[in-house]
Image (cartoon, rainbow, N blue to C red):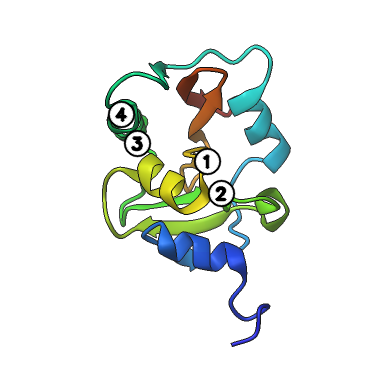
């Protein structure tokens, strides 16, 4: 299969246990707005996990799952929008995915890409739940778009 038929970002989603159910998904906020909401200067996390603490990855997984569930990130069929978690992912734009594993998404993304960072948005584009690495902490960030 040629690269354009099976691009790297598609393979990354598969290795993370995510099934792509729609490409260039409509309904998400602009990529720039989502990045600013997750990594802007004035962002305050809903959870901060010391990266050097024992069990940091597991705690990040737990915190992300808790906040994503509380924010109703997943649609009726368990779908949500996500930027491909690799260099150039923002150029691809929002991709509609379904989590086939159902847990520990930050750890799965980290094992595949080397970092647990990613941006996920509800299918209606209103709620963001992201993870980021900030100095010596892992952050979970929530944002609601109007």
User: Which label belongs to residue 13?
Assistant: none
Mark 1, mark 3: which one is toward the viewer? Answer: 1
Which type of secondary structure does the marked residue at label 1 adopt?
strand
Residue furthest toward the bottom?
1
Tell me the distance, in whole angstroms, between the alpha carbons under discs 2 and 3: 21 Å
- State if disc 4 and disc 3 touch (CB < 8 Å): yes
Residue 70 left/right relative to 87: left
Residue 79 position, x and y percent, is: 39, 54
Q: Which mark is residue 70?
A: 4
- Of pointers 2 and 1, the one earlier in the residue sequence: 2
Q: Is residue 21 left or right of residue 30?
A: left
N-term mark: 1 or 3: 3
Q: CA distance from mark 2 to mark 1?
A: 5 Å
Residue topped by disc 1? 118
Q: Which residue is mark 3?
A: 72
Nearest the viewer among 49 and 68 is: 49
- The image shows residue 47, relative to residue 96, as above or below, that is above
Q: CA distance from mark 1 to mark 3?
A: 17 Å
């Amino acid at each position: 299969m040629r690269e354009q038929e099976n691009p790297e970002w598609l393979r990354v989603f598969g290795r993370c246990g995510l099934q792509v159910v729609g490409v260039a998904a409509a309904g998400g906020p602009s990529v720039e707005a989502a990045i600013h909401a997750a990594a802007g200067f004035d962002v305050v996390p809903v959870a901060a996990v010391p990266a050097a603490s024992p069990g940091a990855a597991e705690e990040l997984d737990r915190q992300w799952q808790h906040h994503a569930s509380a924010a109703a990130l997943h649609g009726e069929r368990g779908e949500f929008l996500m930027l491909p978690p690799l260099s150039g992912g923002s150029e691809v734009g929002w991709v509609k995915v379904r989590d086939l594993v159902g847990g520990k998404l930050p750890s799965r993304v980290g094992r595949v890409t080397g970092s647990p960072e990613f941006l996920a948005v509800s299918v209606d584009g209103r709620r963001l739940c992201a993870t980021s690495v900030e100095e010596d902490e892992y952050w979970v960030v929530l944002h609601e778009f109007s």
